[in-house]
Image (cartoon, rainbow, N blue to C red):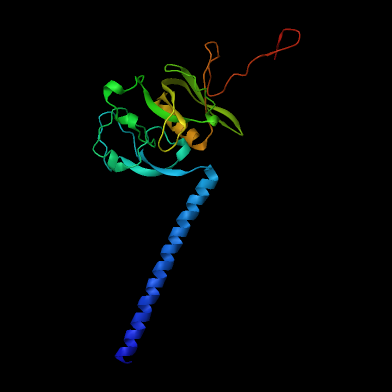
Amino acid sequence: MSRRFRLVISGAFALLAIVLCAAYAQHVREEAESVRADALARYGGEVVSLVVADGAIEEGDVIDSSNVSVREWLADLAPAGAITSVDDVIGSQVTIPVVAGAPLTSLNFRAKSEMASVPSGHVALSLPVTDKLGLASSVTAGTPLCAYRVDEGGAEVISTDIEVLVAPVERTGISSASTITIAVPSSDVPGMLSASAEGSLRLVVPADDVEAVVEGVVAAPSVVSAEGGEAA
């Protein structure tokens, strides 16, 4: 085999390798675009990258690469002031605790003088106020709320011990939707986040005379008969 022939063969293999690499890169891009398109079709909105707590982050903890990561989130469900870059918060000290799986927001880094008063055992959570949420924009700070997950199977109680910290306000940024900041028992936050991500979360304002919710089931109201008595 002559030297010239060997050079031609080597060149051909090198060219083939380049073509295969380019084809693979194109396949990866197409696959990523397909996944993104599927997500948009499934959720009906734009997906953004947010900084999310990998585990519970307590007051006074400093943010570093070991306790946060970047995950995709539906833009319409992104909380107010959501952090989109890890570099923006690396080295920053948390002033309001963050539960595992929750996006970090500017609220978590507010100076104490600017912080809302969060009741003991609760965490502050910001949520977008959409038509699906079912909450009137007229609620004010201090208003008690109840949270439900509503789907085809019915309504499931998530929490009955919620308080409005910051009334719904318009925002700009990732989404222009109005947002509300609420105090939620730490044990109820996972359910709140899950329902919010699904679009099945509903917030309601209970009246003072509403019967308490027992074991997650809402007591059905009595039906008044035509004769004026209560039907069973």
Residue at point 33%, 32% (across, down): 106
Image spot of residue 148 (x, y percent): 53, 27
Residue nearer the viewer, 164 or 80: 80
Residue at (41, 63) in percent of width and height: 25
| Any part of residue 224 in sight | yes
Residue at the extreme bottom of the image, as rendered = 2
In the displayed image of the protein, which residue is found farthest to the top?
A: 228
In this view, which residue lies farthest toward the left?
Answer: 91
The quadrant in which residue 13 appears is bottom left
Please give the name of the residue rendered at 25% of the width and 29% of the height, measured from the top-left corner: 60
Vertical side of 138 occupied by 104: above or below = below
Measured as percent of width and height from the top left, residue 117 is found at 34, 19
Left or right placement of residue 150 versus residue 89 in this view: right
116 w.r.t. 22: above or below:
above
Q: Is residue 66 visible?
A: no
Q: Residue 133, position in %: x, y?
A: 52, 29
Answer with the quarter of the image where residue 119 lies: top left
* Left-right relation of 214 to 73: right
Q: Quadrant of the C terminus?
A: top right
Of 161 and 129, which appears nearest the observer?
A: 129
Quick check: 201 left or right of 122?
A: right
Tell me residue 199's x, y (percent): 52, 35
Q: Residue furthest right?
A: 227
Q: Quadrant of residue 109?
A: top left
Screen quadrant of the N terminus: bottom left
Compared to 10, does 20 lie above or below?
Answer: above
Name the residue at 42% across, 31% down. Answer: 171
Total residue callouts: 0
